[in-house]
Image: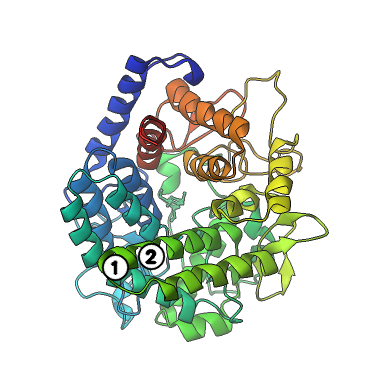
Amino acid sequence: MPATHASELTRSQDAELEEAARAVLDDNWLGNSTVPSPGLYPHQWSWDSAFIAIGRSWYDQARAQTELETLFDAQWLNGMVPHIVFNPAVPPGSYFPGPDFYQSHRASAAPKGIATSGITQPPLHAAAALEVYRHAADPPEALAFLERLYPKLVAQHAYLKSCRDPDRCGLAAIVHPWESGLDNSPAWDAALAGMEIPPGALPSYQRFDIVHADPADRPTDAAYDRFVYLVARYRDAGYDDATLLARSPFLVQGPLFNSIWRWSAQALAEIATLVGDDPAPHQADAERIRQAILDQLWDPPRQRFGTRDVRALRRNHEDTILAFSPLLDPELPAPMVAAIVELLGSPCFHPAEAAEHYLVPTYDMCSPGFEPRRYWRGPVWINTDWLLWLGLRQHGVHDLAAELRADILGLVCRSGFREYFHPFGGEGFGASSFAWSAALVIDVLNRDRRP
Ligand code: 2M8
């Protein structure tokens, strides 16, 4: 891989980088889907597959389509797309919690013969499917793919609307930090801290993640106890959504999950037109989600977006990378765009020019809880950078977008396709050969070549 700084990559270094990224995706390909990384994450993950399909869409339409279709083969009857689809060939003891712990067969809505988790992840899939169509070398085949996937995407969105909007305000709530995709983020600390684990209620368990990654970088045991307790509760309630909403001690609405949902609802409207269905209901959904993000998640006195704890009826005041995600809305009002850009450029998220640094840390660097190595509590991740890059571009914030692009490429040139990176110096941590880091680098390189 080229060792030069990314802003100076030549055309042939660009090509070399893309080849290295494709090799990661090839190595992680299992025949029908791609593992995030062979050691730490040996199954199929939901939003990882969406990022991976977007990366592959630029050069391998068939695998991009198969990636998403394999995931939706495991969709539950109620429309929920599970966050993990377990690979039966992976030996027990490779990943915790695995199929034995989730026991998805206990849920009447779970698919027969496919073991999955019982929770979901950000619904990026309609947006990803549309990207696959837009970049397709074989448009008729891509249209047939959209026709196959469309009813499943509609069911996924209907599930979120009918089963995850407890106060009918237009936002989907998550019932587990794992559903956010940013599970160890300080954004969930207050909600988790208020949770009591009754004596004897925590099943005994063994973590395998700390065999593959440095325990100092991963979530703490105390956080894992809460993650495991929440899963055990849902499982023991048969993953019944009404029970979840009524009793879940963790019920939070966040800007990233909902901004992605809005984006996908908009994409679904476009897909509806392509496949000959009525786009209006999806457009209305996108508008409803958009309005709810503005009404419920914007904190006027602080001029910030944040999470809302539906149980405790309070906003969380931690500044995390989630605060920037409403930039994904092309119609975000200009004062909110300006407030986001100001926070992004402040010393809390933008290290001083003098230090060797990479944008964007996932947590406020001025907070005493900032940890530059620990999972989602400070390090830079390629997927959150990529989402912000898209958002900044569409709002015409070209200088910051260019800086982000250079940092995304600079990080992988310096440290390889790692899972996440130190904001100062760019050292890589977590899994190596991490699929979404590779896929999104492919997207960054191609989106500029073929805008
Ligand atoms: C991480 O989450 C899993 C649980 O789902 C874990 O920590 O074991 C997160 O980074 C999540 O966003 C990602 O989808 C998953 C696989 O890459 O790993």
Identified by mark 2, the residue type is: Leu
Marks 2/1: CA–CA distance: 8 Å
**Residue 407's x, y, as percent?**
53, 28
Res 92 → quadrant:
bottom left
Q: Check disc 2 and report the residue beneath it.
A: 268
Q: Residue at x 24, y 46 (%)?
A: 136
Left or right side of 396 for 111: left
Front-most of residues 201 and 238: 238
Front-most of residues 211 and 121: 121
Determine whether 413 is above or below 396 in the image: above
Res 148 → quadrant:
bottom left
The colour scheme of the drawn protein is: rainbow
Q: Check disc 1 and report the residue beneath it.
A: 150
**Residue 341's x, y, as percent?**
69, 42
Res 200 → quadrant:
bottom right
- Disc 1 is placed on an element classified as helix
Q: Disc 2 vs disc 1: Cβ atoms closer than 8 Å? A: yes
Determine whether 242 is above or below 341 in the image: below
- Disc 2 is placed on an element classified as helix
Counting residues from the start of the chain, the first of labels 2 and 1 encountered is 1
Whether residue 194 appears in this view of the structure is no
The quadrant of the rendering that contains the N terminus is: top left
Q: Residue at x 25, y 31 (%)?
A: 23
Q: Residue at x 71, y 38 (%)?
A: 365
